[in-house]
Image: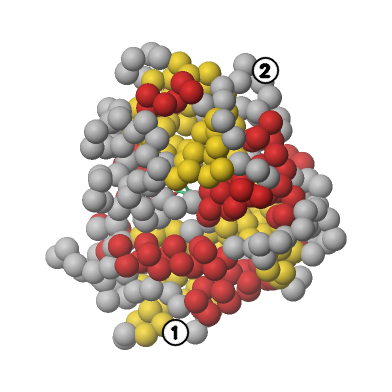
């Protein structure tokens, strides 16, 4: 075990010992390589640097109550990377390569997996970039796939606490027929201005309205939105949002614990009727929302004033993190053990 102060680990980058790489050259993927360098050497004309041929994934490995290491739903991350690769015309990484790279990255850095009880986990960041040189706008002939890992602490330092979010209509993160459904680099650059402004104005994150009509909720910067009312878990259906694996999992848990799941457009006009609201993604699992303020009208939708998440958010969070840490039966078969 590394000498790390696990309790004060930030949600940020900490150097680990190894990362795993694979190159696509001359029309085929090569062998996996183990690297101890934090750097990559790239051609100055690589398409990732100019034309945004880049996609990433994020998933976590957890050290459980029984001491075993569980990797959560990696196959879903692989499927989504396929989709992202197709979206910006990159060479897809096959399932075996993805799996082996992820498992190797965890095994080889096992000393960086936070101990059970610290609230931490090992975050895996697989990514795929166009590394080949092109001056005209076209897809590269060479690609690079890397998996690096970094230990992360709990997303919320003071525990599971509701946050304020800002609804924005004067910036779009993704066009209706654009790339919002894929985890591709450009989407995040497009959302930076709104996100930074939201932080500056005192909010944890921005929530985007749909870019065409501005009447519906799309999603929060890097997390899906959900609202709960009348025993229903309601989450937006839109082509321009990313299909969150955390949200997929929460929908199954919601049904398990007695909520009805609705996946449909969620009107801004409906925000006032929710009893609870939250954002979900791998980083925080669930960020309960204390209030949403519409930046344009100043209108506020308040979900909790007590500083505590609502009861459904708590139940969903407990269940999902329980499965991840081996405290709750994994009846959906979401976790795969890593041998380390
Ligand atoms: C990664 C991401 C999410 C969360 O997806 P998970 O699979 O749950 O981590 C949600 N929205 C966007 C835009 C994302 O990039």
Which residue is denoted by mark 1 in the rendering?
30
In this view, 296 is above or below 123: above
Give the Cα distance between marks 1 and 2. Answer: 55 Å
In this view, 68 is above or below 151: below
Residue pictured at 30% horizontal, 44% vertical: 174
- Which residue is farthest top? 298
- Dot 1 and dot 2 residues touching (CB under 8 Å): no
Percent x, y of residue 130: 32, 67
Percent x, y of residue 182: 37, 56
Per the image, label 1 sits on a secondary structure element best described as loop
In this view, 70 is above or below 215: below
* Residue 16 figure quarter: bottom right
Residue pictured at 51% horizontal, 26% vertical: 274
In this view, 76 is above or below 287: below
Residue pictured at 37% horizontal, 85% vertical: 28
Question: Is 3 displayed left or right of 248 in the figure?
Answer: right
Percent x, y of residue 34: 57, 75
Asked if residue 207 can be seen in this view, the reply is yes
Label 1 crowding class (10 Å Cα cut-off): few <14, some 14-19, many 20+?
few
**Quarter of the image that includes the N terminus:** bottom right
Which residue is denoted by mark 2 in the rendering?
306
Closer to the observer: label 1 or label 2?
2
Asked if residue 278 can be seen in this view, the reply is no
Percent x, y of residue 76: 52, 64
Residue pictured at 51% horizontal, 33% vertical: 227
Label 2 crowding class (10 Å Cα cut-off): few <14, some 14-19, many 20+?
few
Per the image, label 2 sits on a secondary structure element best described as loop
**Quarter of the image that includes the C terminus:** bottom right
- Is tag 1's residue or tag 2's residue first in the polypeptide sequence? 1
């Amino acid at each position: 075990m590394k000498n790390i102060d696990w309790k004060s680990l930030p949600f940020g980058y900490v150097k680990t010992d190894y990362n795993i790489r694979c190159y696509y050259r001359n029309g085929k993927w090569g062998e996996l390589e183990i690297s101890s360098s934090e750097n990559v050497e790239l051609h100055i004309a690589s398409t990732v640097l100019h034309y945004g041929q880049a996609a990433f994934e994020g998933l976590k490995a957890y050290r459980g109550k029984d001491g075993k290491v569980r990797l959560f739903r990696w196959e879903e991350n692989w499927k989504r990377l396929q989709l992202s690769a197709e979206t910006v015309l990159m060479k897809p990484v096959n399932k075996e390569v993805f799996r082996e790279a992820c498992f190797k990255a965890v095994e080889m850095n096992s000393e960086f997996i936070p101990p059970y009880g610290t609230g931490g986990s090992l975050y895996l960041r697989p990514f795929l970039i166009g590394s080949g040189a092109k001056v005209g706008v076209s897809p590269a002939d060479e690609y690079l796939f890397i998996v690096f890992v970094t230990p992360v602490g709990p997303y919320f330092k003071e525990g599971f606490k509701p946050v304020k979010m800002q609804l924005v209509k004067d910036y779009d993160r993704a066009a209706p027929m654009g790339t919002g459904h894929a985890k591709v680099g450009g989407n995040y650059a497009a959302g930076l201005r709104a996100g930074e402004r939201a932080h500056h104005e005192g909010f944890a994150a921005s929530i985007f309205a749909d870019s065409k009509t501005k009447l519906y909720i799309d999603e929060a910067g890097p997390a899906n939105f959900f609202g709960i009312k009348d025993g229903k878990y309601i989450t937006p259906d839109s082509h321009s949002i990313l299909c969150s694996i955390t949200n997929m999992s929460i929908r199954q848990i919601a049904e398990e614990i007695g909520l009805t799941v609705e996946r449909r457009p969620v009107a801004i006009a409906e925000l006032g009727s929710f009893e609870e609201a939250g954002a979900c993604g791998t980083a925080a699992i669930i960020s309960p929302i204390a209030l949403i303020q519409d930046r344009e009208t100043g209108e506020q939708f308040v979900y909790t004033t007590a500083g505590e998440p609502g009861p459904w958010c708590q139940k969903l969070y407990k269940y999902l993190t329980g499965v991840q840490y081996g405290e709750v039966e994994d009846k959906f078969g979401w976790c795969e053990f890593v041998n380390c």
